[in-house]
Image (cartoon, grey):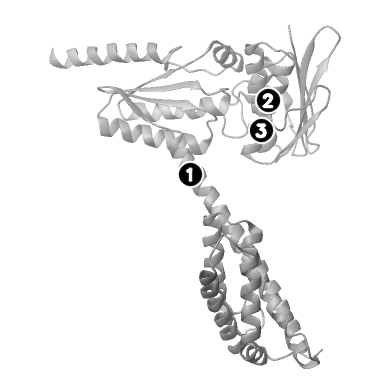
Amino acid sequence: MTAVAPSALAQTLVDHAETVRPAWLDAAVDELRGRTTRGELEREQSDIYQALVDGLQAGGTDLQSEAFDQLRGILADVSAARARLGFTPRETAVGVFALKEGLYGLAGSDDTMTRVLPLLRLVDELGLFTFEAFAAARESIISEQAEQLLELSTPVVKLWEGIVAVPLVGTLDSARTQVVMEKLLNTLVETGSTQAIIDITGVPAVDTQVAQHLLRTVVAARLMGAECTISGIRPQIAQTVVALGIEFGDIRTRATLADALVDALREGRRSHTEVTA
Amino acid sequence: MTTAPSATATERLEVRADSDVVRVRQLVRTVAQQARLSLVDQTKLVTAASELARNTLVYGGGGEVEVELVADGRRSGVRAVFSDEGPGIADLDLALTDGWTSGNGLGLGLSGSRRLVEQFSIDTAPGAGTRVEIVTWSR
């Protein structure tokens, strides 16, 4: 088969727009019934069709070429919008693949056949690109959500004048430690607190990595002039920490948050009287 | 949980990323509960598994973990095997010394894990990877 010039393909699309466009629209509306409106799809398809024709007229042969920059942009936008609206991958790609329904309608004479085949191949590429764009959009949504969750799961609360606490729940990995440390240090400054309590009641296991993260946070708080207490050390955690051989050194630890709060209040009062005395 | 193992099956998990270490920990905890380990022993075993899985990941360049429920007639227990095809450990005595680390941890992971479980065996050679087996029995 001899290669057909892109401009000839563009001409085919222009000439047969009357046949291709309605068939494409019908097929897409059929699949996406209830998810989007006919008018919306028509506008979207009109943009894609025009960009496809423009790209071919500019001499584009494969989707990655510069001539199709605009087309790729439109497809990426449509896919990203669908990903955010909760469309399935199928629902996202079907809008593009439905263009084939329109092209099949042209497969009558031998003359158009040589032009329809390269166009069909191009539609496959468009579909694959749509998939990739959809997946990329989903990935970015997931990592956004993970970030939000990270923020959500690490509240720093003011317990009393001069006393802040961080109740930790779940796994303490490097990323979370970073968030906890930053928030704790910022809150210490904002509230003018001198006592910080890190409560690990909700941490299921304290291994060397968790311990190391805790120690670093305490050291950072101390550098800012705050005294740090680690509370919520349950019996099984205490035994595990001892067996592991982790040394908490001179860091104050307490069994419960209540104990730590009493200590911190006492400490706060003492430093207060020292100042006024 | 969908990954809850049956009583006799051996569960196998790949360790390729930090999130896999969390999965190993959850699996070991589930099996430890099935073996009716005390809360203290559960926590010790889970902590040891966490250390060893992280070693597999960080020093072994990734590998796999096998966890199974074992029984010797009177007692039940949990066996976990951590294996990687990494560089292996050249000086095992040194690696088992408290506070020594070839990375930037506390240097207690390997030596501490040994104290957290009842049976601990390690099989390694330079260039031949590392295999650590731990077992804890119910009382």
The dot on residue B49 is 2
Label 1 element class: helix
Horizontal side, residue A262 vs residue A213: left or right: left
Q: CA distance from mark 2 to mark 1?
A: 27 Å
Residue A262 as seen in the image, left or right of residue B88: left
Identify the subunit bearing mark 3.
Answer: B
Between disc 2 and disc 1, the foreground one is: 1
The foreground one among A93 and B23 is: A93
Residue A30 falls in image quadrant: bottom right
Could you tell me if the residues under marks 1 and 3 are in contact, i.e. CB atoms within 8 Å? no
Which amino acid, by three-letter code, is at mark 2?
Ala
Quarter of the C terminus of chain A within the rendering: top left
Residue beneath disc 3: B23
- Assign a secondary structure to mark 3: helix
Distance, label 2 to label 3, CA atoms, is: 11 Å
- Could one spot residue A33 in this view of the protein? yes
Q: Which residue is mark 1?
A: A147
